[in-house]
Amino acid sequence: MVVRTRYAPSPTGRMHVGNLRTALYEYLIARHVGGEFVLRIEDTDQERFFEGALDIIYRTMEETGLDYDEGPDKPGDCGPYVQSERVTEGIYMKYAKMLVEKGEAYYCFCTKERLESLKTTVAGKEIMLYDKHCLHLSKEEIQANLDAGMPFVIRQNIPNEGTTSFFDDIYGEITVENAELDDMVLIKSDGYPTYNFANVVDDHLMRITHVVRGNEYLSSTPKYIRLYQAFGWEPPVFVHLPLITDEEHHKLSKRSGHSSFEDLVEQGFIPEAIVNYIALLGWSPEDNNEIFSLKELIEKFDYTRINKSPAVFDMVKLRWMNGEYVKTMDYDRYKEMALPYVKQVIHKELDFDKILELMKTRIEIFPDICEKIDFFEELPDYDVEMYTHKKMKTNSENSLEVLEELLPILEKQEDYSLDALRDVITEYTVKKEVKNGVVLWPLRTAVSGKQSTPGGAFEIMEILGKEESLRRIRIGIEKLKNC
Ligand code: GLU
């Protein structure tokens, strides 16, 4: 049997981290065994429909590399792949009526008011267990109501006695009392199916073998099992995924910045790093390796290693991982992604490639660049105390001496390339018989005005060029003279 999985998003906005993980795991389960991966759009909740959300889904699937074999824009033999189109084809109504015929579902004409009156509070939570009032309508009564155009829903008929069990591949055997299961609505009064009904019908018709979703669906699964049984269909393998929390063990939120794929991309994370990190939210490989391309994940992904305890989304770790990706990424792509940040802070004509090369191994996410390179644009108004460094054995006196001695040498120097600067300054250091730090600390301080910089004095001076380097050294000399 061909393994078939599906990602079934509701087009309600950006793709949340939890949904992306579901999509990724579905993709990996299928690809790991050479199976098929389907994209199905679940848009039956018209109120939640969000204009443009479909484009977000397509774009995110593309940017994350989760290519599907069948979907709204990739026809297969199970289409249409958009639920509202399946409604138009009458698919859900046909199957709901089939259940009515079998006595596994029934028409319900109860008014809103009557349903309201059935609400009770259990353990502080308001719940509504339908009392099967309409189950007892005769065929004639039902027909008369339908003929009169009375609004109706179709409900699942779950017996009050007995239990329902199923096996989840992560959570194990689960058994619930049927009396706890509500006669849930399958077809709503607008003729649309509920998610609860449509997912079962579609997963069956689309020959889905493994259903992967968040564990918030675990409690509804017995009702789905009853639907499979009512139709006489083989249920798929169920793989429910653990909750993802933030570092404080709260639900992920927009405020903390890790709610969606797009939010993360906007914060400067690379899609591959996000995908790699998300793969590890609830799953771990056998070895301790953590950096995986999508191809490697396909090879390694054994879904039985999914953990049922909540996964913590650790921003610090994602940042680290992103930095590892930046280090190894192809230079042209890096440039394309990083250059806008350089241009945010540097408006002068400097060698951007040199700045970019300098930054490649020194950032975690692209926006880190701005704060690290702003001194190239303008020398900050730094404190003269910065020249004093215990370990480097520098103070304001020897710093002034070094800068004053270096100034004429650097004024004479024409070649400001890295190697030439290194040669001439090393020559001076050797002649002076001092340690490198005694010369390089004051020099770097003067040309950058910063305590820590990407690269040392030579790199910075090469980028700044002769004129600006000398101007900064002269400012340093003045500062030191006046202190
Ligand atoms: N449309 C559901 C959602 O977006 C899908 C749940 C499922 O995977 O069955 O949450």
Image (cartoon, grey):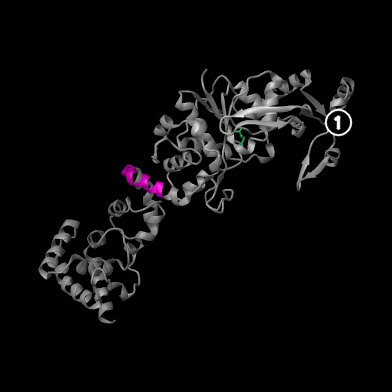
Amino acid type indicated by mark 1? His
Residue at the image position 36 percent from the left and 59 percent from the top: 372
Left or right for 391, reference 6: left
Residue 408, image x, y percentages: 15, 71
**Splitting the image into 4 quarters, where does residue 107 fall?**
top right
295 over 398 or under it: above or below: above
Q: Is mark 1 within 8 Å of ligand 1?
A: no
Residue 93, image x, y percentages: 73, 23
Residue 357, image x, y percentages: 29, 51
Magenta region, residue range:
320-332
Q: Can you name the residue that lies furthest to the left here?
A: 431
Q: How many numbered circles does the render carry?
A: 1
Disc 1 crowd, CA 10 A, few/some/many (<14, 14-19, 20+)? few
Q: Magenta region's main secondary structure?
A: helix
Left or right for 29, reference 131: left
The C terminus appears in which quarter of the rendering? bottom left
Left or right for 272, reference 414: right
Q: Is residue 323 magenta?
A: yes
Residue 27, image x, y percentages: 49, 30
Residue at the image position 86 percent from the left and 22 percent from the top: 143
Q: Considering depth in this image, is 466 or 393 the residue closer to the camera? A: 393
Q: Secondary structure at mark 1?
A: helix
Mark 1 highlights which residue?
Answer: 133
Kindly tell me whether residue 89 is visible in this rendering.
no
Q: Considering depth in this image, is 434 or 165 the residue closer to the camera? A: 165
**Splitting the image into 4 quarters, where does residue 98 fall?**
top right
Q: Quadrant of ligand 1?
A: top right
